Image (cartoon, rainbow, N blue to C red):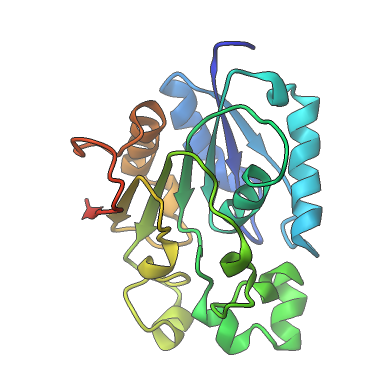
Amino acid sequence: MSGAEHVVLLHGLFRGPSSMARLARRLREAGFRVHNLRYPSRPRSLEQAEEAVAGQLRDLGLDCVERLHWVTYSLGGIVARSLLTAPGERPRGRLVMLATPNHGSEIVDAIGGSAIFRLVFGELATQLGTSGEGLPQRLAVPDTDIGIIAGCRWINPVGRLLLTSEHDGSVTIASTRLERMADHLVVPRTHTFLMNGPEVAREVAHFLRHGRFAGSPAPLGEGRIRSV
């Protein structure tokens, strides 16, 4: 498998590989070798999710390829941040994060402590708040080219009630940003279906090849934000 452009896809909370199937198909059509991985949809801990992903990487021989890119959705981006900043050598590649709460979610702040939330979404989800003690705030940022796509439409009424700035129904645009991101894009998509947009797939493929989204003259080290 040496020399190929491999891409790992990681789904989000309460989802599975089927939620990434449309994006996987479009990236394969664009010429990438895509590996749509699974981890527990309601993980008890970050370690449980990491172990599931790391085991599949070993089984598929992806620890030994020349280039390994990552495309993650929501919680999958948190899992990838942890894996990509853990000690050890790994293949170099780029990372595209879709609607990831890199600074946590105000929804978790408001209702994450309830027994119903924990029962429905699992223990790990309760750690995704916006405080300094929240899991997203404690994770390091991977040393690689990072492109981030956020949504600005919503269908989730809870988001309208609890999120205090522009959002996709579950995560604010501000929360998706990272200090060392190479590029940031806002698309008119909701959190739930953001990964299904054909324009999102095109932008993902462009970033994996060039380190920037389409239309950027160069990687945006200062994290300039654009919309489509």
Image quarter in which the N terminus is found: top right
Q: Which x, y percent locates residue 181?
A: 39, 50
Q: Is residue 41 left or right of residue 215?
A: right
Q: Quadrant of residue 164?
A: bottom left
Q: Which x, y percent locates residue 147?
A: 39, 45
What's the residue at 54%, 77% (across, down)?
A: 130
What's the residue at 33%, 38% (across, down)?
A: 203
Residue 22 lies, with reference to residue 120, above or below; the image says above
User: Which one is nearer the viewer's eye here, 81 or 22?
Assistant: 81
User: Which one is nearer the viewer's eye here, 22 or 172?
Assistant: 172
Q: Which x, y percent locates residue 133?
A: 64, 77
What's the residue at 30%, 53% (across, down)?
A: 223
Residue 184 lies, with reference to residue 155, above or below; the image says above
What's the residue at 68%, 39% (across, down)?
A: 37
Count every numbered label the image shows and give the total: 0
User: Which one is nearer the viewer's eye here, 148 or 167?
Assistant: 148
Q: Residue furthest top?
A: 2
Q: Which x, y percent locates residue 138?
A: 62, 66
